[in-house]
Image: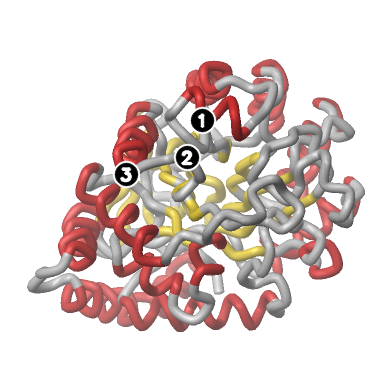
Amino acid sequence: MCYAIPGKVVKLEGFAATIEYFDETKKAHTGLASVAVGDYVYAQGGFVIQTVPEDEAMEIMAEWRRLFFRLRDTDRKLAAAPRTLYERANAVRQKKLGNSCCVHGILEFSSHCAANCLYCGLRRDNAAVSRYRMTEGEILDAAEYAVKELGFKALVLQSGEDPWYDEAKLARIVSGILKRCPVLLIVSIGARPLSTYAALYKAGARGVLMRFETSDPALYGRMKPGSSLEARLELIRGVRELGYMVITGFLAGLPGGSNRGTFRNIRLTAELGAEMFSFGPFIPHPQTPLAAEKLPPLGSMLDTIARTRLMNPEANILVTTALETLDKENGAREGLMAGANSLMINVTPVKYRRQYEIYPGRAGVEDDVPSRIQAVVKLLNSLGRAPTDIGL
């Protein structure tokens, strides 16, 4: 399945394109593709990434037309007559954003990390974890497979804070992927000089996934030794000023946090201008200093999603893999029905996927990717969600 529906450009104002999807319109930035009024395009994450021949677009849209309206009706029915906190949040999501739902791929290319965060299984001092680095060729091949064979239009390149991939390597990887296939590339590589992010933007990356984990400076300093919250926030603001789409958020249920801290975390995410909110539950890893801490209940995470939606009605909210790990059967569905509107599917080659052990028992690690995609499509169809771009 392709996780985007072609739309027709009906208006251009500078770099902003108005795109029509059946009877709905979205806006997207045209910096990655040259377009004209009347062109059919794929957009993802608020960026036009590819033009589509009219005959091809019409064929795809004909297949989607009946399903699109049926899905929208399903979504509206499920969001009707809200009573509970989750139902109210879902109704707000439906009213403000419709049934749009982005599905991104995520490719984890290195499990090496120079940081020593107390909560993470990839922390530098964990000698028990198995480390790997994908070669540039492996990364390019995996990305091309995800786009051309699996149909993804947006892809997250994620790693630990691994300096072995220096600026030149990362820029080659980004430009190499874009030479092979059109895709919205989002990088999640941690603390790097702003100049490196500028180089990756020049190479074609357009999104950055970088969480601040907690809005409490003292707690941040304890959990990430040698780092400061101020520096992290300065970097997030810096990449946004470069023009990146920013995905940020926090670690919910972090030991030492509080309910009041959760509200501060939500507010800070919004203040940073996040195009997408990303927050997952703290899951203790046995080879970390926080091994004995308790796993937060699924309900607390769903409460956080719902409150985030009510506080930020037009936010794009991600259902993280960590949330799905709390309930592998129903976690994704519950998150979407509590107000979230985005998912990620792990496309890392399975021989490496097992070694990216941020926390134990990760959802989807052993899944066959095509089968995982089918399960996600089935879930989205049951909830009335459609892969139109979330827009700007």
The residues bearing labels 1 and 2 have C-alpha atoms spaced at a distance of: 7 Å
Which amino acid, mark 1?
Answer: Leu
Q: What is the crowding at mark 2: few (fewer than 14 residues within 10 Å), some, or many (at least 20)?
A: few
Question: Which of the two marks, 3 or 2, is nearer to us in this view?
Answer: 2
| Residue at screen point 74% across, 53% down | 108
Q: Nearer the viewer, residue 36 or 213?
A: 213
Q: Quadrant of the C terminus?
A: top left
Dot label at residue 259: 3
Name which quarter of the figure residue 374 lies in: bottom right
SS class of the residue under badge 2?
loop
The answer to whether any part of residue 56 appears in the image is no
**Coordinates of residue 194 in the picture (x, y in percent):** 65, 18
Q: Does residue 373 appear to the left or right of 390 in the view shown?
A: right
Task: Please report contact status of discs 1 and 2: CB closer than 8 Å, yes or no.
Answer: yes
Of the residues shown, which amino acid type is indicated by label 3? Asn
Q: How many marks?
A: 3
Is tag 1's residue or tag 2's residue first in the polypeptide sequence? Answer: 1
**Disc 1 versus disc 3: distance between alpha carbons?**
14 Å
Query: 134 or 295, which lies in front?
Result: 295
Mark 1 — residue? Answer: 219
Q: Which residue is mark 2?
A: 256
Q: What's under tag 2, amino acid-wise?
A: Gly
Please state the horizontal and vertical placement of residue 35, each as a whole percent of the image: 48, 41
Crowding near pointer 1: few (<14 within 10 Å), some, many (20+)?
A: some
At 84% from the left and 30% from the top, the residue drawn is 163
Which corner quadrant holds the N terminus?
A: bottom right
Secondary structure type for disc 1: helix
**Image height of 82 relative to 45, above or below:** below
Q: Which numbered disc covers residue 193?
A: none
Q: Is residue 9 left or right of residue 234?
A: left
* In this rendering, position of residue 210 left or right of residue 108: left
Where residue 174 sits: x, y (%)? 74, 39
